[in-house]
Amino acid sequence: RVRATAFTDIAATRLRFGPLTTQAGHLMHDGSLAQVSIIDAAGREFEARAWTLDGFAELTVPTDALPLALSVASPSGKQFQVVDSVEVVQ
């Protein structure tokens, strides 16, 4: 699951995703790496690394062009999701 927050004044989007779990269903250890790939509606590609805390990871992407195609690779595998709505912060 992804929770997205748009920062309209800087044209950026914060993504909080998780819970990231092991194949046995346990939360990933704090500090586990998640490799994130994002493609926005304008076709721009972003690559980032995020680390888990309490099973969740968070990052801010310098785009607000929705939808965002999100791919998250972690030790438990790869997950895909399209983000097409956000909470707006002014």
Image (cartoon, helix red, strand yellow):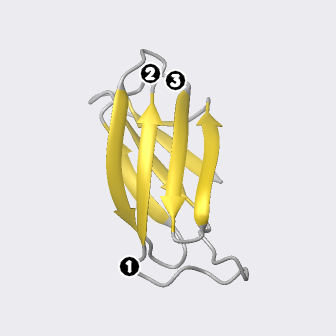
Provide the residue designation for mark 3: 66
Q: Front-most of 8 and 52? A: 52
Mark toward the start of the polypeptide (1 vs 2): 1
- The image quadrant that residue 82 belongs to is top right
Whether residue 14 is situated above or below residue 40 in the rendered picture: below
Q: Secondary structure at mark 1?
A: loop
Whether residue 5 is situated above or below residue 2 in the rendered picture: above
Q: Front-most of 51 and 24? A: 24
Q: Quadrant of the C terminus?
A: top left
Amino acid type assigned to the residue bearing label 1 in the image = Gly
Question: Which labelled disc corresponds to residue 31?
Answer: 1
Q: Residue at x 45, y 25 (%)?
A: 40
Q: Residue at x 37, y 61 (%)?
A: 50
Q: Residues within 10 Å of mark 1 (few under 14, many from 20)?
A: some
Q: Secondary structure at mark 3?
A: loop
Label 1 to label 3: alpha-carbon separation: 29 Å
Please state the horizontal and vertical placement of residue 75, each as a whole percent of the image: 52, 71
Amino acid type assigned to the residue bearing label 3 in the image = Leu
Q: Front-most of 72 and 11? A: 72
Question: Which labelled disc corresponds to residue 65?
Answer: 2
Q: Are marks 1 and 3 in contact (CB under 8 Å)?
A: no
Q: Secondary structure at mark 2?
A: loop
Whether residue 89 is visible here, answered yes or no, is no
Please state the horizontal and vertical placement of residue 89, each as a whole percent of the image: 42, 38
The mark lying in front, picked from 1 and 3, is 1
